[in-house]
Amino acid sequence: MNSENTAQTEGPTAYPSAAPLEFRHVGKRYPGADGAAIEDLSFEVPAGEICVLVGPSGCGKTTAMRLVNRMIDLSSGEILLDGRSVNDRKPAELRREIGYVIQQIGLFPHQTIAQNIATVPKLLGWDKRRIAARVTELLELVGLPAEMGARYPSQLSGGQRQRVGVARALAADPPLMLMDEPFGAIDPINRERLQDEFLRLQREIRKTIVFVTHDIDEAIKMGDRIAIMREGGRLAQYATPDELLAAPADEFVAKFVGADRGLKRLTLSHLGDIELTDGVVVKVGDPAEEARRRAADHGVEEVVVLDGGEKPLGRLPVARLNGQPVSADDADPLAAIGGRSTSLRDALSLVVADRNRPLVVVEDDGRLAGLVSLELISDALRPPG
Amino acid sequence: MAFALPLAQSDPVIPEFGRGSSCVRDPDALFCWGWVKDNWSDTLQPALLQHIALTLIAIGIGSAIAFSLALTAHRRGWLTTPVVVVTGFLYTIPSLALFQLLVPFTGLTRTTAEIALVSYTLLILFRNMLAGLAAVPAEVRDAAIGMGMTARQLLWKVELPLALPAIFAGLRIAVVTVISLATIAVFVVNEGLGAPIYNGLQQTFSTELIAAGGLCVLLALFSDALLVLLQRAISPWARVARR
Amino acid sequence: MGAGGTTMNDFTDAFRFIGDNVSLLWHLTLDHLALTGAAMAIALVVALPLGVWLGHLHRGSFVAINISNIGRALPSLALIAFGVALLGIGFVNVMVALVVLAIPPMLTNAYVAVDGVDPDAVEAAQGMGMTPTEVLLRVELPLALPLIFAGVRTAVVYVIATATLAPLAGASSLGNVIVDQATYRLPGVLGAAICVAVLALVAELSFALLQRAVTPRGLRAGRRDGEEAVPPPGEGRRVLVRYANS
């Protein structure tokens, strides 16, 4: 289709697998309207990253997204996809190389799932065999059984339709995807699952993605970068989630991210990211005397009991040592155990629930990794630099 | 012509009852199968075929006009009201009157009959086509454009297929209506099932009008059923169970 | 016929006929209206209570909705012919045929109107302690009235149109002139056809205005000119019926 892109040979299309996107002083003004819908919007999204546009309703985030594939035409400035202004492209042609997912998904009710997914490849004139192969591949990629291809959209659940929407947007392997509140109509439990699934998928496909949401928690979870927009279509702050939470640019951003932004930041780090303390450990069968001495050395009143394989069995208050060798029966069982992938926020919650006692953290194989205390977690919250 | 073979005509002429059937002996009977059998090939069957032809032509032309009007009005909304007013006006005029009012223009011809019949299909077909196109969900349209469909592709690949059930609903009403109204065409042109019905009304022998009237009702019901089956065949997605 | 001048003359003659025969046409119009009125009165008494009652109970949807399809398939000429065959000729025969034609659109609309009243409104009314009769009279009927009325309007125009065929079965109406070309010639036929068309249009318009008047104000905003667009079968909760006028 695109003679300009014939040099590209990778992937199922002639497109590069991901392309950088840049907004340069973009403005949108509707005739007859008082203010601008979008005002001097500038930011860059590096190839392969997720940029989340977030803000209160009416801030122009969806408008900004729709300027990219020219569903709306901009009034001033320019938008560059892979270094080339979208205004130089024919709208239909441009849209075929940009994946498009909207909240209501908009599957075609009169076409089967397979036909839906094949929409853009068909528009691009792929041959039948290649389309069929691509459809099978995509169904698998989004975790749907192949036989679902023969069904109609009305026969699918909301979550399944959402997956089909993503597969359809990915069909021609576009270098850029636009997603407008793609998980907005899904119940909270399934939304979380779909978000996780999508992040896992993105690690594989590495697309450049513009993601619109009004939910700051979703923005923090999904975004490599977040553009917070405010009424009048102005950019309030453009930063990574961590920067945004640690150093909001102004009152508006601080208010929008919420007073609990410290806690939100904790969701961004995991126990694997921080240095754990070793804690005081004893093994089953160690003499009571030695256990007591170690506790005294570190000034603690409890030790962690490990079995022969270094797996934690419980906590043992020093006062309970009675001269016999250390036994698992004397120890209090652990209320909770953390892992390397546990977020700091969850770790904090577990520590607080366990009367501020340090949380025991294990490796994937169950061996003790260390302990995390309240102090460690609050240290992690200190602003960077 | 009447003098062609006056002497060779040996059979007695019994014009009122058709070719000497058993009914001649029992003219008061409500219905006589023998008459139907005897007159099928020279009266009823030709009338039925003419009736079908009248209907098909009216529906064909009516669909073409309504379709182009609906497609235009779909893009230019202001057109809807004037079209509905004009076609609604035509629709309200009683058919016997409309057929007669056309006579000064097109005479006692089949054209007159077709113009009147077409004018009765327009409102039904136009409204249903437009309603079907308008009922395409906004997000479906948005997704189609967002994926790079041109206006033409959007219309032919998405909007029209989705409007099919509504279009067929209109088609069914239009077909049944035209089959029914085509009987009135007998007042301007001696064609269709209206002719034997009208003929039957002029005599005390009732078999002819009952047979022709019954055929007309059967034709309407059969066409309606046929359209239902056709619609199901071309819109399989409308049938699947919804979760 | 066909040439512009003759066409003009035909219509000029038609209007002259109307002017010369005011008294005849007036009497035939009264006959026409008497036939229409009698048939409508009987059909109303049969169709409306039945449709409203079925709709209130949400029962009999198959019959109530399909009766109008069957009604539409019945050619009025054939129906009058059947009437002649079964009942002989005269006012009563034609009236019975007209009643049969008027019932389906009114029955279906009344059913659909009451059946389709917003269930939330009905539930709220029950929740506030209304008896079934009170729910019907105070909630369902007022909300259903515009649609019920649309059915009556359809039937009236349909019956006026069909009454034109009355002379074929020995009853009197404006059709007397139209079907008797031998006596009245083309100007007479055209003149009477104009009268019938005007009568139908006047009935349609006045009933459209009446329908507006009976529509509760809260329902008026946002309704697209009050009518139909027959939805696809199966989605047909608000099927409205209209008939071409034979």
Image (cartoon, rainbow, N blue to C red):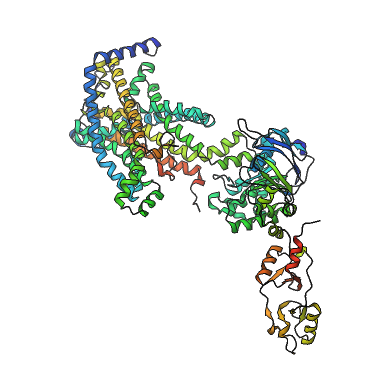
**Considering only vertical position in the picture, is C19 above or below A74?**
above
**Considering only vertical position in the picture, is A54 above or below C195?**
below
Which percent across, then down, holds residue A371?
A: 75, 71
Which percent across, then down, holds residue C243?
A: 35, 33
Q: Residue furthest front?
A: A251
Q: Is residue B220 left or right of residue A34?
A: left
Q: Quadrant of residue A97?
A: top right
Residue A44 appears in the picture as rendered: yes
Taking the spot 75% from the left edge, 90% from the top edge, the residue there is A323
**Considering only vertical position in the picture, is A375 above or below C43?**
below
Taking the spot 31% from the left edge, 44% from the top edge, the residue there is C51
Quarter of the picture holding the N terminus of chain A: top right
Depth order, front residue of C119/B156: C119
Depth order, front residue of B162/B175: B162
Q: Is residue A192 left or right of residue A109?
A: right
Which percent across, then down, holds residue A244?
A: 73, 51
Q: Residue furthest top?
A: C5
Q: Count up the numbered dots.
A: 0
Quarter of the picture holding the C terminus of chain A: bottom right
Q: Residue furthest bottom?
A: A323
Q: Quadrant of residue C162?
A: top left
Residue C89 appears in the picture as rendered: no
Which percent across, then down, holds residue B136?
A: 53, 40
Depth order, front residue of A362/B145: A362
